[in-house]
Image (cartoon, rainbow, N blue to C red):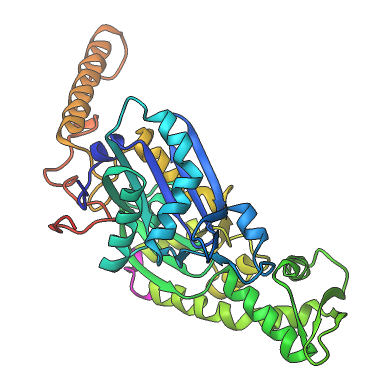
Amino acid sequence: MISMTLTLDHLRRCTVAADLGAARTRVYLKQTGLIVDEPSVVAVNTKTGALIAVGTPAERMSGRTPANIRVVRPIVGGTVVDIDMAQRMLRAMVGAKLRRAWRFRPMLRAAVCIPHDADPLARRAALETLVGLGARRVELVDSLITAGVGCGLPVEEPEATLIIQVGAATTEIAVLSLGSIVAADKVAMGGETIDRALVQHLRNQHEMLLPSQAVRPLHRALAGAVPQMTEVAGRDVATGLARTVKVDPEELRAAAQPPVTGLLDAIRAVLHRCPPDLVADLAERGVMLTGGAAELPGLDTMIRDSTGMPVNIAEEPALCAVQGLGSLIEGRDRPLSRRGVRPGRGSRRQERQERQRRRRAEAFTAGAVADTEPFDPMAADPDPEPGLDDGIASGARSGSAPL
C-alpha cells in the first residue's frame, strides 16, 4: 500500500528514510543511522545493460568512459527521471544491508523526502522507486519540513523561521511557522548552476575548457583562501592543447553573481507574501542555510547584504533533510502541529494523561510544602484546542487519494 496522508504514528512505523538528491542519495535505517551517502550516479554497459559501478566509483568515471559505457544520473533536481535506473542504483547501494535488517520483517515501510509542491508525476516516480526497493507502504514528507527538523529549528513554534535549502540544481525557500509552510518558492539555481557559470566564463573570456574536477580551486578563489591570482589548468578551445591561465578572484565573483540574483529575488518574493509579524521575527532570528551547496563560498554574504538579516549555516547542511526524517521515524521529536506532521489519537491521549498526572503531582506538592504558592490549575499547561493538531503533513495534500 502506498500512503499519501500520514501522521507521526505512520512515520514511526517506517524503518527506512531516503533523501533522493540530484547530487547524492542518502538512506537512513531506523535504530542504525545513516547507511548510505553516495553520489546519485550509475555507470552502465550500453551493450549488455549490466551495471558497472554505482556511487563514488561511477562518479569518477564521468567524462572518462569509452563508447560502450554510459554514466547516468537518474535523479535531476530532486525528481526521479529514470525510475528503472534509480531502482537499480538503490538496490546496489542498500540491498545487502536491508536484507540483513529485514530478514524477519518482510513488510517494509519507507519514508522519502520530496520537493515542496512536487507535481503528481514526481510523487509517483518517488513512490515507484521505493516500491522497487521492496517497500509495501511509502510515506511522502516535504523536504523543507524535514530539513528544518534536522537543523534544529523550532518549526512547531508560532515564531517564524526562514530556511533556504540549496541543492545541486534547485534552491527552495520557505517560511515555517506552527509546523507548516507559510510561504515558499523554488528557483532553478544550485551549486551546479554556479559551477556552469564559472566554466562558461573561462570559456568566453579565456578560451579554455575546464574539466569538472578543476572547479574546486575556483571555489577556494571565491572564498578568498588563495592568493590574488588563481592558476587553473584546462584545454585550449582553438588548438585543443592543455594550457594554464591565471584568473582574478574578483572576475569569478562577478561571473557567479547573475545566478545568485534569481535566488535573491525569490527570497524577497517569499518575504513579501508573509505577514508583517512573521517578518519581524525573521529580522531577529535570521536565515538558516541547508543543503549540499549551502557552504558555497560567498553565498551567505550575498544573502546577508541583500536582506539585511543574519545568515546561519547548519552544522551539517547536506545531511539536514535525511537526519530530520530519520528523527521523525525514530520518534525523537515533538509532534508538528497544524499542517505539519501530527500525532495520532493514541499519542494525544498519552500526552493528556501525562499532563493530568503532572498537575496532580504539582497540586500535592503545593499543599504539602509550607510557604509555597497554592496550586493554580490555570497556570498548568492547558489541553490543546480541539482540532489544532488535526492538520495534514506538509508532504501530502488533504483528501488526496493513494496513487
**Quarter placement of the C terminus:** bottom left
Residue 147 seen in render: no
Is residue 330 rendered to the left or right of residue 94?
left
Residue at 28% x, 61% y: name it. 124
Q: Is residue 3 left or right of residue 222?
A: left
x and y, in percent, of residue 150 in the image: 46, 46
Look at the picture and state if 328 lies above or below 391.
above
Tell me which segment is drawn in magenta.
271-277
Figure quadrant of residue 203: bottom right
Compared with 241, 328 (above or below) is: above
In the picture, measured across the screen, residue 119 lies left or right of residue 94, that is: left
Q: How many marks?
A: 0
Q: Does residue 169 show up magenta in the picture?
A: no
From this viewpoint, is residue 226 visible? yes
Q: Position of residue 378 (x, y in %)?
A: 19, 31
Which residue sits at x=39%, y=59%?
84
Determine the residue positioned at 46% across, 73% down.
267
Quarter residue 175 falls in: bottom left
Which residue appears farthest toward the front when viewing the image? Answer: 48
In terms of depth relative to the viewer, which is nearer, 180 or 378? 180
Whether residue 241 is situated above or below residue 128 in the rendered picture: below
274 is within the stretch colored magenta: yes
Residue 310's x, y, as percent? 56, 61
Position of 67 compared to 130: left or right? right
Q: Position of residue 162 (x, y in %)?
A: 44, 61
